[in-house]
Each structure stands twice: as C-alpha cells, then as structure tokens.
Image: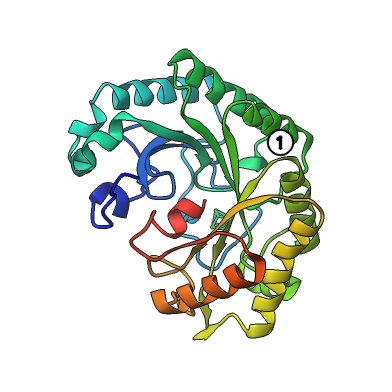
Amino acid sequence: MPIIQNHWSSVVDHSRRYQDFTYVYPVISRRSRGLSIGINLNPDKRCNFDCVYCEVDRTIPGKATHVDLAQAADELRWLARHAVTGGLGEEEKFREAGALTLEIRDFAFSGDGEPTMVPNFDACVEMAVGVRQELGLSDTQIVLITDAAGLDKATVRRGLEIMDANLGEVWAKLDAGTEGYFRQVNRGFVSFSRILRNLNLTAQARPIVIQSLFLKVHGEMMSALELRSYIQRLQDILAVGGQIKEVHAYTIARPTPEAWATRLTLAELESLASMVRNETGLQVLTCDSGCVGGVTLLK
Ligand code: SF4
C-alpha cells in the first residue's frame, strides 16, 4: 500500500473546488489509497440529511442547479487525462503526492449533498463508466458515497447495477443505532427505518462499506446503549444475508457548525471500533482527523 502522509496539502485539503470546474475535483484519499476524482452531483448543495457535523455552507448558493452531464463528462475526461499524463502531480498542492497522482484509484460520486437525490443517477453512472472505458481506466473503481436515503429509488438501483459491472462500490453512512440518535446527529428528512431497509437491500445485492462518524454531543460520547443498538444494526444487515466489506470509523476533523458537536480522541475512537470489531467480526478501519479529510470525504 502506498504511504500517504497526513500533512500533505492534498490530503489535508479535500476541497471540492478545482480550477473553474463545476462538478469534478481531485483528492488524495487514504481510504482510496491514492488519487480519487470526486464527481459532485449536488452543485445545488441539496441533501436529505442535515448532519450536525456537515461542513457544506448552505448559506451560500451552489454553483449550478442541476447536473449538466456533457459538461461533467468533459471535466472528468480532462482531469483524468491531466492526472495520468503527470500534469496534476506537477501542481503545487499535489506535488508531495508525486507518483500517486498518476493512477486514478476511483471516480467517487460525492460532493456538496446527497448524490442519490439527482433524478437521473443511472445516467450519471453511465457517464462516468463511459469516460472510464474511453480512457482505458479498467482498474479505476466507481464509488458512491451516500447517506443511503435514496438507495431504493429505481434510477439509483439501475445505476448500482451498472456500477456492479464496472468495479463499483457503495460507501454508505450509518452513524446511529436508534431513530432518536439518528434524529439528533443526522437530522434526516427521511425515517431511520428507510435507511436501515435500504442498507439491507443494497448489501444483499453486493458487499457494501459502512462509513460511521462517531462524535461527542454536548461532551458525551455515544451511550453504551446506543452503541449496542448500532452494533445490532450491523448484525441485522448480516442476518438478512447482507455483506459488509468493512466499516470505516471516523471522527470529526474540523470545527463543526454546531459547537456542541465535537471530535473523539483517537483512543476513544479506537475503543469504539474495537467493540464493534469484537461484536461483529467485521473489519473496522479507524481514521482520525488527519485521514481522508474526515467529514469531507464522508460525503
Ligand atoms: S454530511 Fe453529508 S449527509 Fe450529512 S448533511 Fe452534509 S452532505 Fe448531507
């Protein structure tokens, strides 16, 4: 595995802005083990969650109101070529990452909101797959980073099937074990039961990655009861034949809009992760603030 340093500017700064692009941006991601090209399907900043730790500033209007697929494809094609031909690695922010910029580990649907809220998710996947094929990037994964609320939509399910045939992977958020904690932390505009149903459904069709952000609320870590429920939710997925490839456990990387939502220490995060590991038998990877941009990479 390549060595990725936490202090590199391309690792610390996971800005979803690149030049004058609207949809596409590069990041060096530890979880992706190298260069990930993000595709922002929510330039309008729409989301069906309102997480207490969200860094997206919704007081400033987004850059566009919808996804222009032709423009997104142009940006993706240009940036992918720029990376594999060495141009990106010569830019100041990416210079430390050197050779890592020459290999595109994944195209990741992510950005300033929830990617499954676009009305034509399947067409967005087809666009990314088309660029991947056109440039011969047969080892590049197609990743969906999602809050799981829209995984049951017909267009999303069609998109996931296309992803399945093209090294696709779903990274789905699960921060809570109960509806009450879900309301407190994610403040979703959908029911927790829908999230859980969607995780089950999706994991039954292909292995998924669970991404969980653990934090302190008013100075308190998740209670033992809540943690027990969270672990139970993972076990529920496994019990219905769902497959979980691994769990990514994070904490907050930077100050949050809600001052009462604060980060765990690495020791606290490790302790939670070890309980989850022991109870479920799943691979649980931890990552503190320096890693993958914390909350930025969650969405
Ligand atoms: S962190 Fe992600 S899921 Fe949560 S409100 Fe922000 S964009 Fe939405």
Q: Nearer the viewer, residue 291 or 220?
A: 291
- The quadrant of the image that shows the N terminus is top left
User: Which residue does the image show at 26% across and 54% down from the upper left?
Assistant: 5
Amino acid carrying mark 1 in the image: Val
Counting from the top left corner in percent of width and height, residue 37 is at 42, 35
- Which residue is tagged 1? 156
Instruction: Report the image quarter containing ligand 1.
Output: bottom right
Q: Quadrant of residue 253?
A: bottom left
Q: Quadrant of residue 91?
A: top left
Q: Is residue 288 left or right of residue 129?
A: left
Query: Around disc 1, counting alpha carbons within 10 Å, would you say few (fewer than 14), some (14 to 19), or many (20 or more)?
Result: many
User: Which residue does the image show at 28% across and 46% down from the upper left?
Assistant: 10
Counting from the top left corner in percent of width and height, residue 213 is at 53, 65
Q: Nearer the viewer, residue 245 or 220?
A: 245
Q: Is residue 99 visible?
A: yes
User: Which residue does the image show at 56% across and 36% down from the upper left?
Assistant: 65
Q: Quadrant of residue 197?
A: bottom right
Q: Relative to residue 13, is residue 281 depicted above or below?
A: below
User: Which residue does the image show at 39% across and 37% down from the upper left?
Assistant: 25
Q: Relative to residue 292, is residue 288 depicted above or below?
A: below
Q: Relative to residue 253, is residue 2 depicted above or below?
A: above
Q: Secondary structure at mark 1?
A: helix
Counting from the top left corner in percent of width and height, residue 241 is at 79, 51
Counting from the top left corner in percent of width and height, residue 155 is at 74, 32
Q: Is residue 31 left or right of residue 153?
A: left
Q: Is residue 184 left or right of residue 61?
A: right
Q: Is residue 120 visible?
A: no
